[in-house]
Image (cartoon, helix red, strand yellow):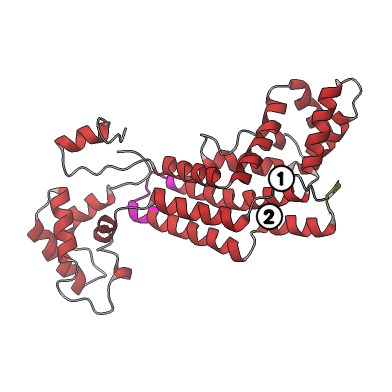
Amino acid sequence: MLGKNSGVATRLTARYPNLFTWHCMNHRLELAVSDAVDEVQAVNHFKVFLEKIHNLYSQSNKNSRELLAAQEVGSQVLKIGRVLSTRWVASSFRSVKAVWTSYEALNRHFENAAGDQTRSSKERQTYRGLARRMQSKEFLCDLGLMFDALSELANLSQQLQAHSVTFLRADHLLKRTIRVLASFKDTQGEKLEEALTAEALGHLGSVPLESNAKLTPINAKQFLQSLINNLEKRLSFDGEMLHDLSVLDTGNWPSTPGIRHGDAQVKRLCRRFNLGEEQAVNGMRDFLEHPDSEPESLKPLIQCMLSVKGASVS
């Protein structure tokens, strides 16, 4: 819809030059995550393995029934779906969470199936390989890392879908998420910390853990930095527009704003929204003198600013 040459937004902008257009923020988020997956190859290996688990149970009622019979945690594992694909990141998080929650049940089912003589030798070999992967310290730590990162990204995705989200709010949420991801580089998230503890103990519950030299673990700092870089690249907003939209935020004002503070921003916004500049500037000056009030002459501009939502394509 935002094609540079013939997209809907391009055609509308040609007719209405002052129109605000932007790409769906959640789609941008998915593209940022996809870019990070492409840049860090070990993440793709993790993705492929979880898709194997998804296919194993989504394509076989027998496997699903056996797994449900083998676990005590309900049907959580049936939530395992494709990860890091075209689905919203919240869907990927649900899948990773389901694997984490059903870790022991999955491993038990893999081991039972590997020894099931009613299955073909090829099937038993497949299950032995799955069990070895589940019992590897490398995979568990990767799972913990992805749980922590996708949890934050899913939270961001959910908040960006709110009908009331504005550009300023979306920008704040994005920057906060980036700070959280950056903090994971210095201090592990909750699930990665649990995985590292299990690694040191040599087991996670009833699942024995050992190193698997054939597996290349995800470089946590590289992956987190890649996420940060691509989030900044894909979801950053036009600096001047954000600067203008923040003109009424008293938290961004200098300690003693001059009487003409914000004049230029208000005028640009008025031209964008086709509002009277003089009335809005006078309202801004009233607001500067009485920050606890909301001048009547400023309300048309305020309403227009609140109408600029950030969650969907427009």
Specify whether 252 is left or right of 98.
left
Q: Which residues are magenta?
A: 160-170
> Which kind of residue does numbered mark 2 sit on?
Lys
Which residue is disc 1 drawn over?
100
Q: Is residue 162 magenta?
A: yes
Which residue is disc 2 drawn over?
191
> Which kind of residue does numbered mark 1 sit on?
Trp
Label 2 Cα crowd, 10 Å radius (few <14 / some 14-19 / many 20+) = many
Residue 166 can be seen, yes or no: yes
Residue 34 x, y percent position in the rendering: 51, 42
Specify whether 39 is left or right of 256.
right
- Residue nearer the viewer, 177 or 307: 177
Residue 295 x, y percent position in the rendering: 18, 63
**Residue at left 52%, top 35%?**
87
Q: Quadrant of residue 311?
A: top left
How far apart are the two marked residues, 2 and 1, measured between alpha carbons? Answer: 9 Å
Q: Is residue 96 magenta?
A: no
Secondary structure found at label 1: helix
CB under 8 Å between discs 2 and 1: yes
Q: Is residue 265 above or below residue 55?
A: below
Q: Is residue 197 above or below residue 257?
A: above
Farthest residue to the bottom: give it: 256
Circle on res. 58: none
Q: Is residue 284 above or below residue 207?
A: below
Specify whether 188 is left or right of 122.
left
**Residue at left 59%, top 62%?**
185
Quadrant in which the C terminus appears: top left
Residue 72 can be seen, yes or no: no
Secondary structure found at label 2: helix
Residue 194 x, y percent position in the rendering: 73, 57
